[in-house]
Amino acid sequence: MALSQCRTIRDTLGGGVCSRGYAVRVPQNVPRIPPRFTDPRPVLAVGSALWLLATIVVVASGDRWESARPICLMGLAVGLLGYTIFAIQRRGARRGDKGAQTGLQP
């Protein structure tokens, strides 16, 4: 009966205790997500390649898609910015910086 009174996450406090004073069971062994699902490199590579392809098509088509040219160039810029942030975070994780993300060492 005690655990049934603590039904929502809002009712729980840190440490697995319900705000009403009842203990909450929390599983200790949470499975890890496979690295292939957490690696940002394929996403950045595919996204950047698609923006590059779109930019080439827009530039090659001449005046027909002239209004799409700045969008394609900004897509390339955002991809470059994303990879730069990823590279900085990975370098910090490899060095062991205190504020760096975890799991970026490969």
Image: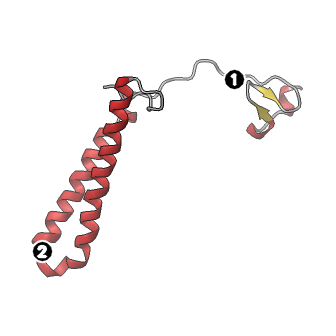
Q: Residue 20 location, x and y as percent?
A: 89, 31
13 or 95: which is nearer to us? 95
Which residue carries the number 1 mark?
A: 26
Which image quarter: residue 26? top right
Side (left or right) of 8 relative to 82:
right
Query: Looking at the image, is mark 1 or mark 2 earlier in the sequence?
Result: 1
Q: Residues within 10 Å of mark 2 (few under 14, many from 20)?
A: few
Tell me if label 1 and label 2 are in contact, CB under 8 Å. Answer: no
- Number of numbered discs visible in the structure rendering: 2
Callout 1 secondary element: loop
Which residue carries the number 2 mark?
A: 61
Q: Does residue 19 lie above or below 26 as drawn?
A: below
Q: Residue furthest top?
A: 28
Q: Amino acid at mark 2?
A: Ser
Q: Residues within 10 Å of mark 1 (few under 14, many from 20)?
A: few
Q: Residue at x 22, y 71 (%)?
A: 69
Side (left or right) of 8 relative to 38:
right
Colour mode?
secondary structure
Q: Residue at x 73, y 29 (%)?
A: 14
Q: Quadrant of the C terminus?
A: top left
Q: Residue 89 location, x and y as percent?
A: 37, 36
Q: Residue furthest bottom?
A: 63
Q: Amino acid at mark 1?
A: Val
71 or 4: which is nearer to us? 71
Q: Residue 73 location, x and y as percent?
A: 24, 64
Q: Residue at x 77, y 40 (%)?
A: 10
83 or 29: which is nearer to us? 83
Which image quarter: residue 4? top right
Residue 103's label in the rendered image is none
Q: Quadrant of the N terminus?
A: top right
Callout 2 secondary element: loop
Q: Does residue 57 lie above or below 48 as drawn?
A: below
